[in-house]
Image (cartoon, rainbow, N blue to C red):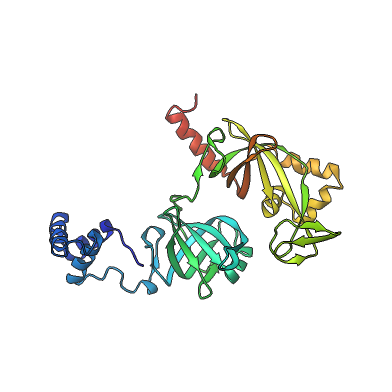
Amino acid sequence: MMSMRYEDIVNSIKKEAGLNEEEIKLRVNKKLELLSGLISKEGAAHIIANELGIKLLDDISLRRFKINKIITGMRSLELLGKVIRKFDAREFNNGTRSGKVGSFLIADETGTVKVVLWGEQCKNLDEIKDNDIVKVKNAGVKENNKGFKELHLNDRSKIEINPAGETVGEVVLVGSQRQLKKINEINDGDNVEIAGWILEVFEPRFYASCPFCNKKAEVNDGRFICGEHGPINEKMVAILNLFVDDGTGVVRVVCFRDQAEKILGLDNNGIQMLRENAQAFEDVKNKIKGRHVVMDGRVKRNEMFDRLEFIVSSFNESDPRNMAQNLLKEVEFGKVS
C-alpha cells in the first residue's frame, strides 16, 4: 500500500493551496473528529488534499524521482543514481519459493538506497561496477524489516548502465544499510560495517562447492554431493583469512569466493596458482598489507578458538580523501590528540 508521511502531505498542501500549518492542522483535526476512529492523521490529511484538488501522487509512473522523495508502495518509477557498493548474488530457498537475489547501493544528491534484483535481473550485477551511473526503470518501492526503503526490480524492470548524457552530482551517503562499528564494539551476531588496516594475510585455503548454488559439497563414496543438486562436478572455492586493525582492536576477517578474489585482485584460477608458487603469494600479500579497507558483514563467534570473527559480504578500499576529511573532523572535535 502507498504511504506518505504526514509532514510531506502538509508541505504539499501549504505549497499548492497557500494555507499555513495552523489552518491545515485545524482542518485535519475537524476531519478526525468527524470520522473518529475510522482514519489516521495521514488519512485525514489526504482527504483534505483531495478536497482542495491537490493530487499528491499524480502520474508517479511518468516521473523520475530523487531518492529522498520515494515512498513505500510506489510502482513503475524511474530513478538515477551512482553505484557506491555491490553485493554478491546468492541462491535462496525459504520453503515456499526459491531463486536468486542480489543487490547494490546507489546514491544521488539527496540520499542512498538499496536496489534489490530478483531472478534473471541478477545478471546485471556482472556488468555493474562501483561509480557507474545507473538508470533504474519500472522499479517498485518496499520497506525492509529494518525500516529502510528499497527499490525492487522484477522481470519488467530495466537497468541502463552509464546512459548517455546522464550525470549525478555530489552524492549524499545517508540511510546506510549497516551501522559502522569500531572493532572493540562488535558483538556476536552483529550485521555491521567495519573499517581498518590489513595487518596480515594468510595463504588461501580451498573447499569443494556446488557450481550451481555455491554451497559446500560433501564427499560420499568418492563423489562430491550437494544437498540440493545431488552428485556434482565440484568447484574449488577460495577462503581468505586476514587480520584487520582499526586502532581499537584486531579481528580475524574471513572472505569467501568473490570477496577473496576482489581483495587479492585475482580470479579463482589465479588464486589456486598461488598454492604452487610461494613467492607469488608473498608478492601479492605484500601489496595488500597496510591497505585501509571498509567491509560489510556479520560477526560470528568461533567456538573452537573462543574468538569473534568477521565474515565479509562486501569489501571496498577506502577513499584517501574521505579518510583525511574524517581525521580532520576528529582532530577538530578533540577525538585525536
The residue drawn where x is 54% and y is 58% is 104
The residue drawn where x is 70% and y is 58% is 215
**Image quadrant of residue 216?**
bottom right
Q: Is residue 23 left or right of residue 89?
A: left
The residue drawn where x is 68% and y is 47% is 255
User: Which is more toward the observer, 213 or 198?
Assistant: 213
Residue 152 place in picture, x, y as percent: 48, 65
Residue at the extreme top of the image, as rendered: 337
**Image quadrant of residue 17?**
bottom left
Residue 31 place in picture, x, y as percent: 15, 63
Q: Is residue 230 left or right of residue 32?
A: right
| Quadrant of the frame with the N terminus | bottom left
Give the answer, above or below, for where 97 lies relative to 185: below
- Res. 130 in view: no
Residue 194 place in picture, x, y as percent: 56, 41
Q: Is residue 271 left or right of residue 50?
A: right
User: Which is more toward the observer, 85 or 205?
Assistant: 205
